[in-house]
Image: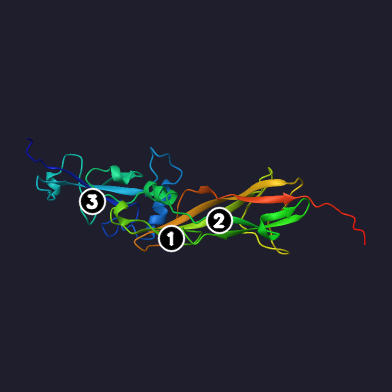
Amino acid sequence: MLEPQPHWKYRLGLSGCDSDGGPALSGHCLAAATAACAGNSPEQGLGPLSDVYRWWVDEDGDPLPADEWPAGSEPAGPLEQQLVGTTCLPNRVPGVSPVPTVEMIIAAFHETRWATAAVKTQPEGDTTLVNLETFYRLSWSREGFEPDEVDTVDPATMYGYRVQIRPRLVGYVYEFGDGASFGPTDSPGGTYPHGEVTHTYREPGRYRARVLVTFGAQFRVNGGPWIEVPDEVTVAQPATTVTVKEARAVLVNR
C-alpha cells in the first residue's frame, strides 16, 4: 500500500465571484455562470462556469508553505491558492464537494410532474356543427404543476442543496384533429364572443382535438435569485373528441 504523499488539493468557486472562498450557489453570480456555459454540448458541460483553485498539501491534507510547492507554481491572493483555470464540468474536478449542475437541473425540469390542460369547446358538450365557428379554451388539472407554480426538487438528488423549479409558459399549439392547427400562442382560449382560439370544421365527423404546451422554466438554489433554465420541453396534452354534426334544413307543414 502506498504511503500518503504531498499532493494537490482542489476546490471550486463560481467564476469571477469567489470573494468569500466558496461556491456561493445561491448568489446572483450563478446567473452569469450559467449563461457562460449555455449552448455547450454535453461533452463541454452546461456549467455553472467554475474557477478551479488548488493548493499543495502534505500527506494529512494540511497546506504546505509556498517554498515547498512544486517548481513553477506558487500561491497567490489572500487565500494563498492558485487559480488553474475554469470549467463548465465542475463535478469532474477531483476531490471537490459536488454541486448541482445545470445538466442535473435540466433533468429535474424534464421530470416535472406537469398539470394537464384539457381542451373544452363551445357550443358546450364538445359537439358542434359543420361551418359553425367553434370556440376553444383550456382547463388545467388540479394535480401537477402548471406555469408559475413552484416545484421543489428532492434535496437528496441535489447533494443537499434546495433547488426549486418554476415552469413558465412558452406557448400553446392547438391541434383541431382535422389537420388544422393554431399557434404558437399564449392564449388559453375562451368563450363566445371574446375567445381568441376558434376553428370551423368543414366536414362532419369525430375529431380528436388537443393542445401542445411548450414549457420553459426558471430555477433557484437555496433561495437565491430565479435563473433561466437553458432548455424547453413540449408536452402533448390529452385529446378531447369533438363531434361535428351536419345541420339539415327541414320544411315544416303548418
Do the numbered discs 1 and 3 sit on residues whose CB atoms are within 8 Å?
no
The amino acid type of the residue labelled 1 equals Trp
How many C-alpha atoms fall within 10 Å of the one at disc 1: few (<14), some, or many (≥20)?
some
Element on which disc 1 rests: loop
Amino acid type of the residue tagged 3 in the rendering: Ala
Q: Name the residue that disc number 3 marks.
A: 76
Which residue bears the numbered disc 1? 226
Q: Residues within 10 Å of mark 2 (few under 14, many from 20)?
A: many
Q: Which residue is at the front of the view, 128 or 201?
A: 128
Amino acid type at circle 2 is Ala
Q: Is residue 58 left or right of residue 46?
A: left
Residue placed under numbered mark 2 in the picture: 117
- Decide: is 62 above or below 5: below
Q: Are marks 2 and 3 in contact (CB under 8 Å)?
A: no
Residue at 52% of width from left, 48% of height from top? 235
Q: Position of residue 140 (x, y in %)?
A: 54, 60
Residue 5 x %, y %? 10, 40
Taking the spot 46% from the left edge, 49% from the top edge, the residue there is 230
Which color scheme did the rendering employ for the protein? rainbow
- Label 1 and label 3: CA atoms lie apart by 33 Å
- Location of residue 1 by image quarter: top left
First reached walking from the N terminus: tag 2 or tag 3: 3
First in sequence: mark 1 vs mark 3: 3
Label 3: state its secondary structure.
loop
Residue 47 makes an appearance in the image: no
Give the CA separation, mark 2 to mark 3: 57 Å
